[in-house]
Image (spheres, rainbow, N blue to C red):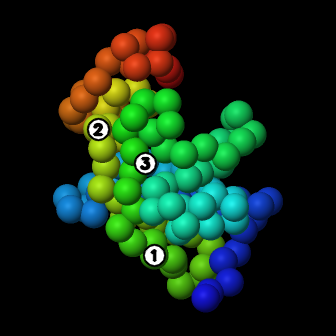
Amino acid sequence: MLTLKFVDSLIPVVVQDAGSREILMVAYATEEAVVLTQKTGYAHYYSRSRKKLWKKGEESGHFQKVVRILTDCDEDCLIYEVEQTGAACHTGYASCFYRTLDGEIVGTKVFDPENVYGKEKK
């Protein structure tokens, strides 16, 4: 097994739809989150704001089944290729990359965050 390089105990994870190849989100993982992802087959991350491990979809039901994990040449970044259930973005969009720098919405809204979380997440 390769030796991943964690900075301040974290490694960035780019999440990509295994079928369409669309980039869905970017998150961070600890070594524990990577091990849980490998063990369960579902994406786990580390929330920097909540300071805790989390399984994608634990609140929303929009899970990410991991098909394959890739690392870059420096072993300091990962790609999770996933089969996404529902939407990847907590704002309700299929991908977190749903708008341009000018604010134009270019993505597809899949769900209403108020119905899932009780209030709209920003």
Q: Residue at x 49, y 30 (%)?
A: 59
Q: Is residue 100 visible?
A: no
Left or right, 113 with reference to 85: right
Image location of residue 13, percent across then percent down: 53, 60
Q: Are marks 1 and 2 in contact (CB under 8 Å)?
A: no
Please name the amino acid that badge 2 sits on.
Gly
Image location of residue 80, percent across then percent down: 43, 64
Please name the amino acid that badge 3 sits on.
Met
Q: Residue at x 45, y 75 (%)?
A: 70
Q: Residue at x 45, y 62 (%)?
A: 41
Q: Secondary structure at mark 1?
A: strand
For disc 2, the marked residue is 86
Q: Is residue 6 above or below residue 106?
A: below
Q: Is residue 18 visible?
A: yes
Looking at the rendered image, the disc whose residue lies closer to the viewer, 2 or 3, is 2
For disc 1, the marked residue is 70
